[in-house]
Image (spheres, rainbow, N blue to C red):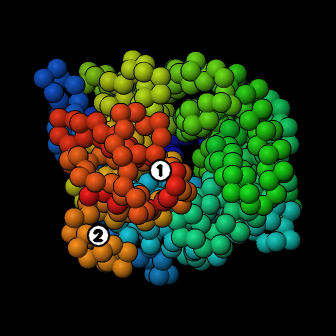
Amino acid sequence: MRMPHTQKSSMNHRHFPLFLLLLNLTVTAQTPRYDQTKEGFLVFHPIKTDARGHIIPWHSADKGEAYDFAIRATWAFWDTMRHDLNGLPYYMNHQVWRPNNDPRGLGGDQLQMALSSWQLLYTYTGNERVKENMKFLADYYLTHSLSPADAAWPNIPFPYNTLMYSGFYDGDMVIGKGYTQPDKAGSFGIELVKMYQITGKRNYLDAAVAIANTLAKHTKPGDADNSPLPFKVNAFTGEVGRLESNEGDGSHAGRSSYTTNWSGTLQLFQQLTRLKQGDVAAYGKAFDAIVAWMKAYPLKTNKWGPFFEDIPGWSDTQINAVTFAQFMMDNPSLFPEWKTQVPGIFDWVYAKLGNDQWKKYGVRVVNEQTAYQTPGNSHTSRQASAELQYAALTGDNSRRENAIRQLDWATYMVDKDGKNNYPRDEVWLTDGYGDYVRHYLRAMAAAPELAPHADHILHSTSILTQADYAPDLNKRLALEIPQDEVARVKLFYRTFDRSATETIRVRAKPVRIMLNDKELKELKKLDGEGYTWQPFEKGGLLRVRHETGNTVKIF
C-alpha cells in the first residue's frame, strides 16, 4: 500500500499519463474518505475500550471471536468481489478496490501475498473455496506473467499489467514494460512449492524450479550498495532499472540494485533443496551468499529498503525488516545471535516507523515506510505476529501486551461487509487481504489462547493437503472413513510430510486420535509420536506429533 494519487508529494511517483491522472482524480472524488480526525473513531468504527481505557476489538470483546470475524469477512469480500469487463475478478486487474474501477494495475506482490494467506486460511477453516481460489491465482499467473525462456532472466513473473485490461502481466509499475522484480519472483516461487505440496501437481514444482534456477544463476556476493540480486531488472536485456531521487539534491538516485526482501527467495531455495528438486548445489551456493550478505549489511546497517513497486526512490520498509526477523526466528541455527538481533530489528522499526497517534488507547502502531509515514493495518498486524512469535520462543513477554492491542487496533480497518480500508487511505488488495489475514493466523499460532473457542488447526510444520472440520466434513471422506465413524469424527486432516507436528485449538478434549490405522497415545511431553492436551478456560490446546503416517482423525 502506498500513497494515493491525491497525496501531495515532491516525488513524481506514479509516472501516469495525464488522462489516467485526470481519471483517477474523478474516481477519487466519488470515493468516500474516512475522517481520521473524528475523536474516538477509527476508520469504520467507534473505538471501544476496556476498563483501563485501552483499545479492544470493535466486533467483540472476545479477541478470538473478533479476530475470526476479521479473517472471515476479508476473505468473503475477496471471494465475492465483482468481475471486470475482461471477465477476470477485479483483484486480478487492480491493486485498489473502489466502487468505481481504480486506474492502477496489480500490486507487485498481490497474488503472492494472497497465496500465502490463503494457504494458512485453508488450514484454519478447511474451506475448499479457498483452495480453489489458490489454484486459480497460481494457474492464471503462471500462464499470463512469465518472461520467455530465451530472456536474460527467463521464466520469472512480471509484477504488473501495463495495459490494464489485457489480462497479462508484462512489466513494472514505475519503470514500465519488460522490467521485473526478482524478490517478488522468489516469493511466488515458494508459494508454487506449497501449491505442489497441496495439490500434487508437478507443473507447480517445475515452475518453482525454473524460477529458482534463474535467481540462483544471477546471485552475486553483493556489497553495501548492491544486494545479491537487484530490486528491478529488465528481464529481456538484464539491464538494472533506475532508482530516482527522493530529494531535491539528487541524493539516493542511481540503479535499483538493492533490496532486502529475500526471505521468500531463501525459503524457495531451502524447500527445493529439502525436496531434492532442481539444481540443489546452485541453490545452496545462492542461499549462502544471500544469508552472508544479509548478515554483513542490513543486519548491521539497518538499510531495510526498498519493497514497494510504486515508489521510484529510496524508502526503508517495515515489511523487509520484520519479514527477515521472522525468517531468523524460523531458522535460529543460522543466526546464533538471533535473540538480540530480532528485538534489535523491532526497536529499529519503532525508532523509524513507530506511531503514537493512539497512545492514549494504550497502543503504539507501525507506519508503512520512511517515504510514506502513515500507519498500516498489515504492517501493524505483522509487527504483532512477529513479536508474539518472539515471546513464544523466548518467554520474553515484554512486548506481548502492545502486540495484542496492535491486533485489536487493526480490526478497525475491517467493515462489516469485509472491506478492509487502509487508515487515511483506500481499500488496498495487498495490505487489506493477502498481507493481513496471514498475520492474525500466525499470531494465533504463536499465542493459541487468542484463537476462537472452536476447532481450528493453527499451525503445522508440514503443508496440509486436506483439512475437514465437522459438521461440514467433505463428502468424499465417506470413502475413507467407515460409515459408523463419520458422525463421530471432529477433524480429519492430511499432511504432505509423514513427519510433522500440529498445533490445534479444540472445543473439548478428544476421545481418540488416529494416525492412519493406529491410535496415538497421550503424552505428558511431546517428545515422540503422540499428542499432548492443555486445557483452557474454554476448550483447550492439542499438539499432535506424527512420524509414521500423514493422515489424522480426531474423534
Q: Is residue 196 above or below residue 429?
A: below
Query: Splitting the image into 4 quarters, where does residue 215 fall?
Result: bottom right
Residue 368 in sight: yes
> Viewer-proximal residue, 547 or 167?
547
Residue holding disc 1: 546
Question: Within 10 angstroms of label 1, few (less than 14), some, or many (20 or more) residues?
Answer: many
First in sequence: mark 1 or mark 2? 2
Q: Check disc 1 and give the amino acid type.
A: His
- What numbered label is drawn on residue 275? none
Q: Is residue 73 above or below residue 246?
A: below
- What numbered label is drawn on residue 473? 2
Q: Quadrant of the C terminus?
A: bottom left
* Residue at image point 47% right, 82% down: 87
> Viewer-proximal residue, 396 or 150?
396
Question: Within 10 angstroms of label 2, few (less than 14), some, or many (20 or more) residues?
Answer: some
Query: Splitting the image into 4 quarters, where does residue 407 fall?
Result: top left
Residue 484: x and y, percent? 23, 73
Residue 28 in sight: no
- State left or right for residue 252 relative to residue 306: right
> Viewer-proximal residue, 354 or 504?
504
* Residue at image point 18% right, 23% down: 53
Gap in angstroms between the C-alphas marked 1 and 2: 22 Å
* Residue at image point 65% right, 30% down: 333
Residue 182: x and y, percent? 72, 53
- State left or right for residue 295 relative to residue 222: left
- State left or right for residue 316 relative to residue 53: right
Q: Secondary structure at mark 1?
A: strand
Q: Secondary structure at mark 2?
A: loop
Image marks 1 and 2: residues in contact by CB distance under 8 Å = no
* Residue at image point 74% right, 60% down: 277
